[in-house]
Image (cartoon, grey):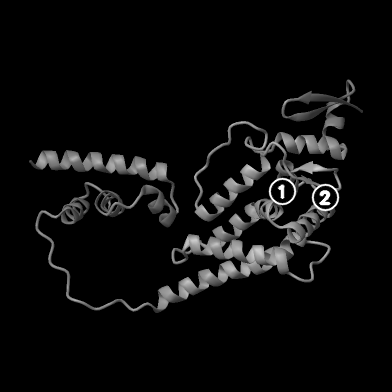
Amino acid sequence: MRIDVTYTAGGTTAVPAFPAGNSSRFRKGATMSCSPHSRLRDVVGRAPAAARGGRPRVRPGRFPVFDAAEAAFTSLATQPDPLRVRTPLGPMSAHLVRPVLTDPATAPETVDAIWRTLLGRARGEGGAWLLLAAGCALPKLRSIAWHACRTRCADRDEVAQELLAAFTHALLHAEPVQDVDVLDELLRPARAAAHRVADQARHLARTRVPLTGPAAPPKPAGHPDLVLIELARTGVITAQEAELIGRHRLDGVSLRRIAAETGSYPMRLSRALRAAEGRVIAALTTDE
């Protein structure tokens, strides 16, 4: 079977040329091997826009600590004269290292070799190399932080700070470092630190005793909370919609935070809020 290779802006595309009459047999389960250089071009084609010099795609982060580290990493990787890392695939600019490390097609031996190089340079020179290593680990660090913060009790900033600090300490001082699964070995103390902070927050929330004090004064008859309760009782809105209007409009809680707490999406809550408020306005206008 002949393979026609076409070079495009996003990398290389290999198109198999199937013989006439046997195309289905050749197409089903057909496999081919690519050279390291052609696979590297494919990975570069999937690199972030900022790494390729284009406009970066801005996505709101849930961990400001990691967002700041990501911004510093992007600034380092897009410098006119970036760091170059020696890898089994050849010398590689800093902005290409993370796409190769996170590509599932990259051989584990290559990943471990790159991480051993980053580890040695970070310990020997620190500074920019330490930032480069931390930036390459950010996808894994974000995943660990997300799992640790699935409970509402854990403070995101505290978990992210502890996680990044533990990873940096392991990057500089962990001994001995094994030859395989280098990143997993560095992430082990960081993962333990993040879950320790989350467990402490959960324990504190369970054992916290509410303060006793004078009872809150009764709400006036026309208080918005009572109006929402009455509208929910009469079926104009549901109890969940009353809670949503009260928290967002009266307490000032953002839709993004409510969505994170309830496992929903801000856009979905926004649509539900508009629909419920429309029924509330119609009901109040009719009563008048």
Q: Position of residue 120 (x, y in %)?
A: 79, 59
- Element type at marker 1? helix
Q: Position of residue 99 (x, y in %)?
A: 71, 44
Q: Which residue is mark 2?
A: 107
Residue 63 can be seen, yes or no: no
**Given the current orientation, which residue lies at the most extreme top position?**
20
- Element type at marker 2? loop
Task: Calculate the distance from the C-alpha at mark 1 to the C-alpha at mark 2.
Answer: 11 Å
Q: Label 1 is placed on what type of residue?
A: Thr
Q: Is residue 151 left or right of residue 188?
A: left
- Number of marks: 2
Q: Which residue is mark 1?
A: 102
Residue 235 can be seen, yes or no: yes
Q: Label 2 is placed on what type of residue?
A: Ala
Task: Count neighbours of disc 1 (C-alpha within 10 A) and say few if under 14, some if 14 to 19, many if 20 or more.
Answer: some
Which of the 4 quarters of the picture holds residue 145? bottom right
